[in-house]
Amino acid sequence: MAEFEKRLPKLGKEYIEKMQLPKMLPFTKMEGIGNDYVYVWFEDLDAPLTDPAPLAIYMSDRNYGVGGDGLVLIGKSKIADFRMRMFNNDGSEGNMCGNASRCVGKYLYDHKHTDKTTITLETKSGIRTLVLTLEKNKVASVTVDMGKPITKPQDIPMKADGETFVNQEITVNGKAVKGTGVSMGNPHFVVPMPDIANLDLPQIGPNYEHHAMFPERVNTEFIEVVSRDKIRMRVWERGSGETLACGTGACAALVACVLNDYTNKKATVELRGGELVIEWAEDGIVYMTGAAREVFSGEIELL
C-alpha cells in the first residue's frame, strides 16, 4: 500500500494553503462533443490562485484525479458578464477553447449564476458572446462568437513571410506536407490528408506540435473534405495530444477550407466526438454551434 500511495500525485499542503484551496474542492465535469474538461468556480481568477498549473495537472489526471482534457476556471469579470481561464492537462494555459466556452455557457445558466440567454465571456483571446438555446429550462446547445480568424503568419504565429500561409509546404519528419495556417486566438495548422481514420496521430502529432515553424507550438487539424458542406477532422492539440473534438480547430478547418475553395462558408465539421456547425459569416466573424453536456458534479479531496 505504501508503494501505491507514493505513485498517487499530491498537490502538497504548502501549495494548497498558499493558493487558499479548500480540502474538498467542488467541481463539475462537462463535455462538448467529447472534449471534456473539469470546471471549477472561483470568484477571482487571479488571486489567491496565482499558479493554477499544478491544480490543472492534478484534476485532469484520468487515473488519480477527475480526468479530462484540462481544467477550466470560471469567475467574475470586470469587462464582461463572466470570465474563463482554460488549462491543458499538462498545466499550460490555452488562449481559447470553443467547446469549453459552450460548456461554460451551460454551466453558468444551469447552475443559476445567470438567467441570461446571451452572455459575454472574457477569455484570454478577448470577449466572446454566447447565445444559449434552451430545452426544458436547460441549455441544450450554444452558439459562440469565435471572433475573426487571423491568417497573417507572423500573427498566428508562424515563422514565415507573406500575408497568408495557404496550401504551402513545410517539412515534417523529413516529408513535405502542404497545409494552411490560421489562428482563432490560438495557432492552428490545417492539413488535408486521405484516410485520416487510419492516421497514427500519437506518432505524427508531436512532430507538428513542436515544429520549428511554430514558436508557440501548434494545434494540427488533419482533414478530409467530404463535400462543399461537410468536413471530416481529427485533431492533435498542443499540450493535450489527440482529443475527441476541438472547437477552435473546427473553426480553423472551415476557414482553411474556404481559403482553399474546398467548401462553402458554412459547413458541418465531423469530429470523433460529434458534429459542429461552423459559419464564417459576412461580418468576418466565425460562429460555432454545438451541444454541451454536464457529465457529473462532485467534490475532490485535495489533501
Image: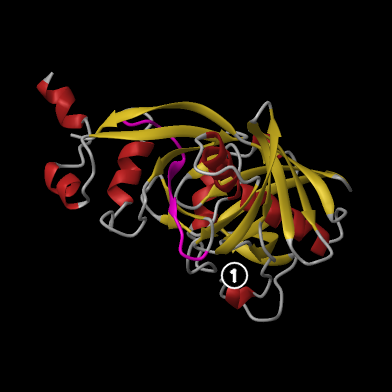
- In the figure, 167 relative to 237: above or below? below
Query: How many numbered discs sit on the rendered protein?
Result: 1
Q: Which quadrant is the N terminus positioned in?
A: top left
Q: Would you place residue 28 above or below residue 128 in this image?
A: above
Q: Residue drawn at (73%, 58%), measured in percent from left and top? A: 286
Q: Position of residue 75 (x, y in %)?
A: 43, 51
x, y percent for residue 188: 61, 59
Tell me which residue sits at (72%, 44%) in the image: 289
199 versus 211 height, above or below: above
Q: Residue 122: give x, y in percent of width and height.
A: 52, 60
The amino acid marked with disc number 1 is Ile
Residue 108 drawn in magenta: no
The 10 Å Cα crowd at callout 1, few under 14, some 14 to 19, many 20 or more, is many
Identify the residue shown where x is 66% and y is 69%. Answer: 150
In the displayed structure, 132 sits above or below 189; it is above
The quadrant holding residue 70 is: top left
Task: Give the residue pinned by disc 1.
Answer: 156
Q: How is the image coloured?
A: secondary structure
Magenta span: 65-79
Element carrying mark 1? loop
Q: Nearer the viewer, residue 119 or 170?
A: 119
Residue 277 vs residue 159, the one in the foreground? 277
Question: Can you see residue 191?
Answer: no
